[in-house]
Amino acid sequence: MLGSAMAMMADNIEHVISYWVIFHKFHSPALGGFAVISHWLPFLLFSFFSGALADRYDPRRLVQLGMVLFMAVSVCWGYLIFTDTLEMWHAAVLLIIHGSAGVFWGPAGQMLIHDIVGTEQLQSGVRMLATSRKLGILLGPAIGGGMMLLVGPAMGLLINVLIYLPLTIWLWKAPYGRKSTDDKEIGQPPRSLRGFTDILPTLRSVAGNPTIFSMILLAGAASLFIGNAHQAQMPEFTRDLGFGQSGFYYSVLLAANAAGAVIAGFVLESGNLLEAKPKTAFLLVLIWCCAIGGFAASTSYPLSVSLLFIAGFLNLAYSSMAQTLVQLNAPAEQRGRVIGLYNMSSLGMMTFSGLFVGVGGSFIGIHWSLGLSAAALAATSALLMMYALARLQAARPVS
């Protein structure tokens, strides 16, 4: 938890500093848009391949590879900024490598959770690690801004490299991962790595499992229609709430979502609440849509902060539950590939969330675009819930 929180914090520190630098150096909205696309597109294209690697190789080493790439990118940012040699193509390449590093971390990290806690405590493990990552997201912007003020962007990014080290070093000898376990659970050696050629067979396999299939579709729909696209529009929401010139009020809106997620992790774990069930996951998404839709329509700043806090709480609850259900129901020999498919849907589809919220907002206004996106997701989730529950009912043996 500590290592993941620090790594996610370092990830967000780099975002804060690098985005600030490229905005002031190039004043390019296109590069800003590319930064979002380059962050999520690798998840869409390569999450399945990364999951296949996690099936075949030690997940500890794949996470370490991701950390090494993160550190290399921070070093390159720091050097180019310090020497004032940063060019637009440098920024584009570094943004792509940074996004790719996250893909190595994703499925392998989720496989590692299962290796550490086992099946019975998987929901707690997933939720606790999700909480630690949200904590890193919450702290990263504040610490990144403070580092820029205290030591400057270049030195801040070079110091940021050290924050990735605890997780990287711990994984070197951590007593978990494929090399520390036998194949009794799997029952057979891991399948050979065929990468993208495995996508269709794996899709056919999960299509026969209504729980996995519906959770992958639900996560993809949530990312496609909303994702985190409203975060990029927060300056406009802040202005419309009457505080457009205040960085403080803007920061509070940004932090409310992450704070809700962190509190959710502690509250749900302290009482061992919300057992992982498909119907519960669907209902949580429907309530999340109500909170996001309410935020889109709100004209009150305190109400907006409250709704974002509630949305963050619900987001962690449903996303950790969906991930748990996918991992619990995935065949052991295909777990990495199935997790890769889930990440491909839940993270990769965020590549397009800006179309519904951002591009749509340029035509009908950001409040209407976010509200209609929430309504579309609610309708899609309701249909998916009816489909999934009907299939689950049909699959139950007749007594």
Image (cartoon, grey):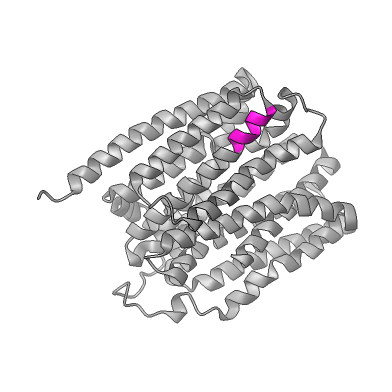
- Evaluate whether residue 87 shows in this view: yes
Residue 370 within the magenta-colored segment of the rendering = no
Near-viewer residue (284 or 203): 284
Residue 200: % across, % down: 35, 52
Q: Is residue 220 left or right of residue 206?
A: right
Residue 346: % across, % down: 48, 47
Residue 110 to residue 148: above or below? below
Q: Residue at x 29, y 35 (%)?
A: 386
Q: Residue at x 76, y 62 (%)?
A: 160
Q: Is residue 175 left or right of residue 280?
A: right
Which secondary structure is most common in the magenta stretch?
Answer: helix
Residue 284 to residue 294: above or below? below
Residue 278: % across, % down: 34, 46
- Evaluate whether residue 351 shows in this view: no
Figure label count: 0
Residue 365 to residue 33: above or below? above
Near-viewer residue (379 or 315): 315
Q: Residue at x 79, y 57 (%)?
A: 77
Residue 303 within the magenta-colored segment of the rendering = yes
Residue 215: % across, % down: 38, 46
Q: Furthest residue to the front?
A: 271
In terms of image quadrants, where is residue 307?
top right
In the rendered image, which quarter contains the N terminus?
A: bottom right
In terms of image quadrants, where is residue 331?
bottom left
Residue 220 to residue 10: above or below? above
Near-viewer residue (341 or 191): 341
**Range of residues picked out in magenta:** 301-308
Q: Residue at x 74, y 54 (%)?
A: 13
In terms of image quadrants, where is residue 226?
top right
Q: Furthest residue to the left?
A: 399
